[in-house]
Image (cartoon, rainbow, N blue to C red):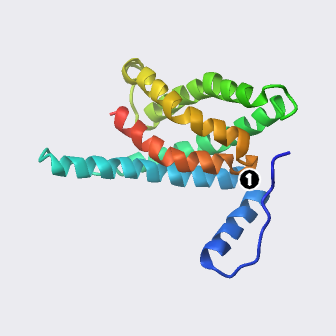
């Protein structure tokens, strides 16, 4: 069984916020992970747009406007897909490949990287296409032009992160850990999907 967090008593603001988060995580794990995923996904999209805006200002190119629907779409994806799906995937990995299974560390990583990651990235493309009101032809074109480069980048960036996450981070914090890294990953995905 993965290590569990212990709530400590301290009056500092950050400690109280952490205590509240841990309490919510214990009482409402899926909802807490989903809301956290939605918030951090939206923040990642805003980060991407801010970087693009800043870059366009430096290059004297036409100024890009902030697309307010971008963070909304990412929040929806994080809230309804990333949070709950990740919760169940991480728990499924623990059930299918407990620490007693020989080579479980590598097997978990391979299962996550070769099965779950490609499917999840495809799901991202499909859902975002629908949220953006684009056509099936748009989706096919986007997959054709950017899915494989994004998947290769996913394997490069996420493989060491997921090795640590699925093998050493306590299961209740895996979605949060991945979401903090995903803050920057979603910024990357936002830029390659354009």
> Residue 130, image x and y in percent?
46, 32
Residue at image point 36% right, 20% down: 145
The image quarter in which residue 150 lies: top left
Q: Pointer 1: residues within 10 angstroms few (<14), some, or many (20+)?
A: some
Residue at image point 73% right, 58% down: 25
Nearest the eye: 40 or 69: 40
Q: Is residue 93 above or below residue 42?
A: above
- Callout 1 secondary element: helix
Residue at image point 61% right, 73% down: 14
> Residue 59, image x and y in percent?
15, 46
The image quarter in which residue 146 lies: top left
> Residue 104, image x and y in percent?
78, 29
Q: In this view, does 92 lie to the left or right of 36?
A: right
> Residue 137, image x and y in percent?
38, 19
Residue pointed to by mark 1: 29
Q: Is residue 123 left or right of residue 131?
A: right
Q: Does residue 69 appear in the picture of this structure?
A: no
Q: In this view, does 90 lie to the left or right of 96?
A: left
Quarter the C terminus occupies: top left
Q: In this view, does 28 lie above or below 83?
A: below
The image quarter in which residue 129 lies: top left
Quarter the N terminus occupies: top right
Q: Which residue lies furthest to the bottom in this view?
A: 11
Q: Residue furthest front?
A: 103
Q: Is residue 57 above or below residue 143?
A: below
Q: Does residue 178 appear in the picture of this structure?
A: yes
Nearest the eye: 178 or 39: 178
Count the marks.
Answer: 1
Residue at image point 67% right, 46% down: 174
Q: Residue furthest left?
A: 60
């Amino acid at each position: 069984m993965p290590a569990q967090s212990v709530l400590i008593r301290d009056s500092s603001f950050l400690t109280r916020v952490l205590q509240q988060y841990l309490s919510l995580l214990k009482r409402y794990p899926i909802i807490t992970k989903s809301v956290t995923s939605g918030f951090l996904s939206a923040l990642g999209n805003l980060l991407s747009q801010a970087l693009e805006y800043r870059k366009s200002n430096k290059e004297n190119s036409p100024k890009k406007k902030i697309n307010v629907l971008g963070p909304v779409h990412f929040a929806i994806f994080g809230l309804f897909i990333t949070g709950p799906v990740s919760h169940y995937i991480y728990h499924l990995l623990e059930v299918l490949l407990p620490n007693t299974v020989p080579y479980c560390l590598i097997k978990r990583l391979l299962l996550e990287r070769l099965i779950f990651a490609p499917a999840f990235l495809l799901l991202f493309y499909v859902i975002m296409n629908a949220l953006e009101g684009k056509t099936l032809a748009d989706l096919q074109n986007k997959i054709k032009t950017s899915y494989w480069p994004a998947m290769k980048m996913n394997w490069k960036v996420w493989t060491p992160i997921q090795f640590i996450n699925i093998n050493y981070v306590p299961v209740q914090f895996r979605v949060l850990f991945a979401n903090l890294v995903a803050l920057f990953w979603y910024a990357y995905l936002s830029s390659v999907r354009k």
